[in-house]
Image (spheres, grey):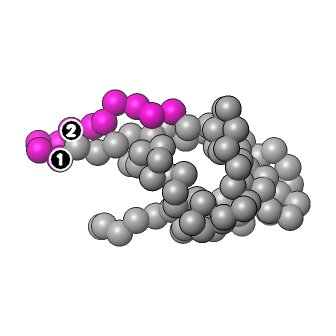
Amino acid sequence: MSSTLDAFRRSLSKAFSDAVTEEVTGLLVAEAWVSLHFALIGETPQRVGALQLCTLRTEITVRQGDVQAANELLARIDRATQRGGG
């Protein structure tokens, strides 16, 4: 994803507040009967001419919940963390 670790953390916390906790291995989003863990690895920014795009490798693991609940939460997280552009 094209984001920094801090920007991703802020957008998750803004959208899901107390549901987000920071762990040594990444961020955990837990709501009701579902929790998703995001292992985040900052990578070398990509350059396109004068434009520099931050790169954040994200590995998502379902820690609790069924497939449907995990997909629903992931879709909400995806919408909450998207930024403008086109």
Q: Residues within 10 Å of mark 2 (few under 14, many from 20)?
A: few
**Residue at image x 64%, y 38%?**
26
Q: Residue 53 vs residue 12: left or right?
A: left
User: Amino acid type of disc 2?
Assistant: Arg
Q: Residue 12 vs residue 21: left or right?
A: left
**Magenta-colored span:** 41-51
Measure how far apart labels 1 and 2 are at the Cα level. 6 Å
Element under disc 2: strand
**Residue at image x 11%, y 44%?**
50
Residue 47 is situated, as x and y percent measured from the top left of the image, at 21, 38
Q: Which corner quadrant of the image does residue 78 belong to? A: bottom right
**Residue at image x 54%, y 51%?**
9
Mark 1 = which residue? 51
Q: Which corner quadrant of the image does residue 71 belong to? A: bottom right
Q: Are marks 1 and 2 in contact (CB under 8 Å)?
A: yes
User: Could one spot residue 54 in this view of the protein?
Assistant: yes
